[in-house]
Amino acid sequence: LDGGGGPIVYWCHSAKELSTNQLFMAPVGGALEWNGSGLGFQGSLCVDQKGADEEAVSFAPCQTASESLSASPSAEAVRVERDAALAEVPKDGQGFERRPIDDGNGDFELRELRPDGAGVARCVSLGIRGRASTLTVAPCDKSKRQRWRLKAAPAGYSSLGAVAMELCVDAASESPSLIQCIPEEGFLSQRFTFHRNGWVEAPRYWADNGRRKLPARCLDSRAPKSKIAVSASCSAIREAHVEWKRLWAEEPLETRLFREVRASRESPAP
């Protein structure tokens, strides 16, 4: 058993190597514990089984329930009509409720908003994927890995901190991860807004002088699965009526200024 991959079954290293990946503490009647500090983890982790109801949480365009049921949902409409969208029910999987935990520290559960009778209540949980910490949803069990705490972030935003590992949810990639909390003015990927309709939104993110950009997205516990793009005959694609739609289309500021200057030069003088 190797702890460096999440854990995984791996070739046994020689006992002389003292590989930290394969050193576990196994007291009689106790938990199987692995110290991952040598690989950057804070503290020890214990081996557990992933429940059948546990699923990954991802990022997806913020949508209302009516948009997700539409044949052609419009992400643009959410941005343009934000006030109206916040008054609607969020898409299934994007609604979360903060339920306080009475411990005096301001901790809370982040529970899925689901219709009555829709199954077992699930809460956002701290998960491990390979060597990285990530988010999952699992049946609410009041465990420490389902405890969260808001931390102040610049510009009126909040950071979402995991109580179990003193890490913060980070939105710098396609899927949420957990890294060291960085409450600096120029660090944009740990800012979140908790909307009244249940959205947990990561605002637009950019880095590297704008060379890395991600649109505003919401946590989603029931995001549609990704589809693999393949090449095919154009005639077959047209016959199948496959259509593409632009999302988050934007014109760079430099391009807009160039067009305006060129248009002003080409227009006739009064």
Image (cartoon, rainbow, N blue to C red):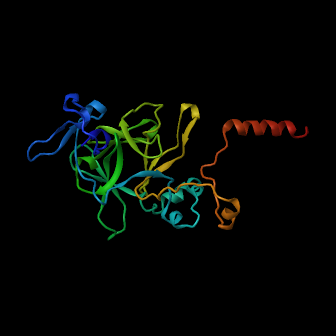
Q: Position of residue 57 (x, y in %)?
A: 39, 52
Residue 99 lies in quadrant:
bottom left
Residue at 67% from the left image edge and 43% from the top image edge: 251
Residue at 22% from the left image edge and 33% from the top image edge: 14
For the N terminus, the quadrant is top left
Residue at 38% from the left image edge and 56% from the top image edge: 96
Q: Position of residue 16 (x, y in %)?
A: 20, 28
User: Total marks drawn?
Assistant: 0
Q: Position of residue 49 (x, y in %)?
A: 24, 53
Residue 199 in the image: above or below residue 205:
below
Q: In screen coordinates, is 43 left or right of 78?
A: left
Residue at 46% from the left image edge and 33% from the top image edge: 187
Q: Residue furthest bottom?
A: 117
Q: In screen coordinates, is 171 left or right of 166?
A: right
For the C terminus, the quadrant is top right
Between 103 and 19, the one nearer to me in the picture: 19
Residue 30 lies in quadrant:
top left
Residue 256 in the image: above or below residue 57:
above
